Each structure stands twice: as C-alpha cells, then as structure tokens.
Amino acid sequence: MKVPFVDLKAQYQSIRNEILPQLEAVCENTSFVLGPFVKKFEEDFARFVGVKHALGVSNGTAADQLAIQSLIRPGDEVITTPNTFFATTEAITAAGGKIVFADIEADSYNIDPEKVAAAITPRTKMIVPIHLYGQPADMDPILEIARKHRLYVVEDSAQAHGAQYKGRTAGSMGDAAAFSFYPGKNLGAYGEAGAVTTNSEAVAEFVGLYRDHGSRIKYEHEIEGHNMRMEGFQGAVLAVKLKHLPAWTDGRRRAAAVYNELFRDVPGVITPKEMPYSRHVYHLYVIRVKDREGLSAYLNEMGIGNGYHYKYPLHLQKAYAHMGFREGDFPVTEKVMKEIISLPMFPELQDEQIEYVVNAVNKFVSK
Ligand SMILES: *Cc1c(COP(=O)(O)O)cnc(C)c1O
C-alpha cells in the first residue's frame, strides 16, 4: 500500500464536472483578473466567514502583508510566534513591521496569551496569532490583551478555513484576517490565491486599492500599491469548492478521530489535542515522537507521505540570524518542533490507509 501525504487528484475527480464549465465560462467572459468570478467568490466567502468584506488577492503571503500593512506604521512592533510558516514573519517585515516573538502553549501549539502580554512594549501595535494546523488560537484572552493595550489583531487563518472558536469562525474575530488558498490548503485554488477578511471599511478600502496599483478608476492612482490581484480562474474554482468545504472538513475530522482512536494504544506518540474552545479543521494531523527523523525515514520506506510543519523554529532560521536569538529563547517552541511530524491528512483518506499508517508508526516507536 502507498499512502500519499495529500491527494489533490481524488478531490479534482469528484468535482471535475462542476469545475470545467466554470473555467470555460471565465474564458468565454475573458474575466481573467478580478472581475465577476472573483467578486462572486468574495461575497460567498465573506458570508461563510461571517464578515462584511472579503478581498481576493494573489496569495496568502500577500493577504498577510496587506492585512498587517493596512493597520500599522513602519517600525511598529508586531507580536507572533516562532512556530509558524515563514510567510507570516516575511509578511510582517514586508508590511514595515518589526517582528517580536512570543512562545507557544505546549498543548495547542498556538501563541500563549501570557507570553504575548510579557512581550508588549510601548512600540507594540499588533498581535498576529496563527490558527496553526487548523485549530484556532485562544482568542478571548488575546483580544482582551489587545483591548487593554490598544493593539490590533490580525488572524493568520491560512490553515483554518471554517475552524471555530466558541462558535465564532476563524477570520472573523480580529481587526482583519488573512487566508491562503494554496492548492494544498483546506480550501485550495488551482494555482496561487489568498484573501483578506475584515469588518473594517478602512481595511477593506486599503486592501482593495493596494492590490490594484492604488487605483479605483483605471489609470488614476491614489496611493502607491502593488499588483496583488486574484485571478478569475481562481475565483471560479474557489466558488465551486467553497460549497464542498463543510463536507471536506467533516472528512478531515473523521480521519483525525480514526487516527486518535487507533493511537490510543500506542505508547510514545502524542496526538493532537482539540482544545475545549475549538472546532479543529485538521489542515494537518501532527503527532509528536522522540525520534522524528528516524520515523520519517521509516515512513518513507513504507510508502507513507509525511512532513515537518515546520522544520526549525523561525527565531533560529538563518534569515533571522541578525536578530541575535539563541537556542533556549523560546523553549516550548524548540522542544515541540524537535518532535513534530505530520501524517497523511485529506478528506478522502480511507480507514484502511489510516490503519496502515498507525501500524507503521507503532512498529517504529515500539522497536
Ligand atoms: C500557507 C501559509 C501562508 C502563506 O500562504 P501562500 O498562499 O502560500 O502565500 C501564510 N501563513 C501560514 C500559516 C500558512 O500556512
């Protein structure tokens, strides 16, 4: 048996008949950049998240940058965790912010509100929690800290389409949020795409202008922006796929439940913890083991896809050597990130495939 890490082909085959006519309609309309197909998706996605505005942009990194840039001034400090994909901190820098790290909680792997409070200085302007692996960060204490210190909150929701925190949808709780529709994300385009969601008119206006050369009317430029527009094909694909997302999320949650059940009898494996406040959407199914490198090599041998999300804490990446961090600065992140390994996770994952994966992990850890 072979178990891929993700299976985008299985999903395409299940919706091929809905997708292809939409792609043809984009061609017939020549609506290749922004336009009616993107607009339709923006309206549907805003309703899905429960916000006033969703703005389609070129990718999730651009969404992160624009959500942040719309609210801060150059040099403002922005607090986030070293346990995220590199795009989050690249976006802070691109938006003119100064990266400040706060450590994570050992059980949720998300930003620790107490560590956020401790990282605040007079120059702090924003907190960027990441809803990592598909589980919302503990937003109530984060929003409370933000209120108290007059800080903005931008949710990095790139892995959390449809995830919920105490019944509120990820991407609706902060001042703005950023989504990625990279093909492997829970809601994936057929190419690059992203979106900013917000209830703020000011944020929506900034993002709408900035993504399109600062222009509302062609060749009239109110500000210097950039080209960060969503393509028509992506809007068309995403509008079709959004209708299926709730069923796909159920598929991921079912797969996670089967994994959890089978891992109950396997010592030496820490499974993901769904926090009482959250509805996890399992973008990734991440376990912790003592020897992840050994396990990864063994899974590769057994034909089982796997990965590290992520390989190294961001404060120890070469790109941030100039910030002068050392091993030991963020001990929870550092400990967790040496042990994590992601197993196959996608809505169509079969029980037999999950059994095969768990048996292989069991065989390795009980050696
Ligand atoms: C995927 C991702 C991004 C960036 O999205 P792209 O569409 O790949 O640019 C940002 N933050 C997190 C947490 C992500 O997982």
Image (spheres, rainbow, N blue to C red):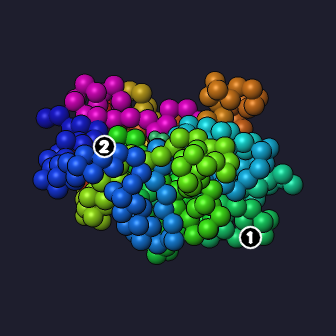
Query: In the drawing, does residue 272 fall left or right of residue 128?
Result: left
Residue 140 vs residue 161, the one in the foreground: 161
Three-letter code, disc 2: Tyr
Residue 156 visible to an observer of this rendering: no
Q: Secondary structure under badge 1? A: helix
Identify the residue under disc 1: 147
Residue 67 vs residue 205, the one in the foreground: 205
Identify the residue under disc 2: 190
Q: Secondary structure under badge 2? A: loop
Query: Residue 12's x, y, as percent?
Result: 19, 47
**The residue at label 1 has a CB less than 8 Å from ligand 1:** no
Residue 292 vs residue 130, the one in the foreground: 130
- Range of residues picked out in magenta: 295-313
Q: Establish if 170 lies above or below 67.
A: below
Query: In the drawing, does residue 221 fall left or right of residue 23?
Result: right
Query: Residue 84's x, y, as percent?
Result: 55, 43
Precedes in sequence: disc 1 or disc 2: 1
In magenta segment, residue 307: yes
Tell me the CA gap for discs 1 and 2.
39 Å
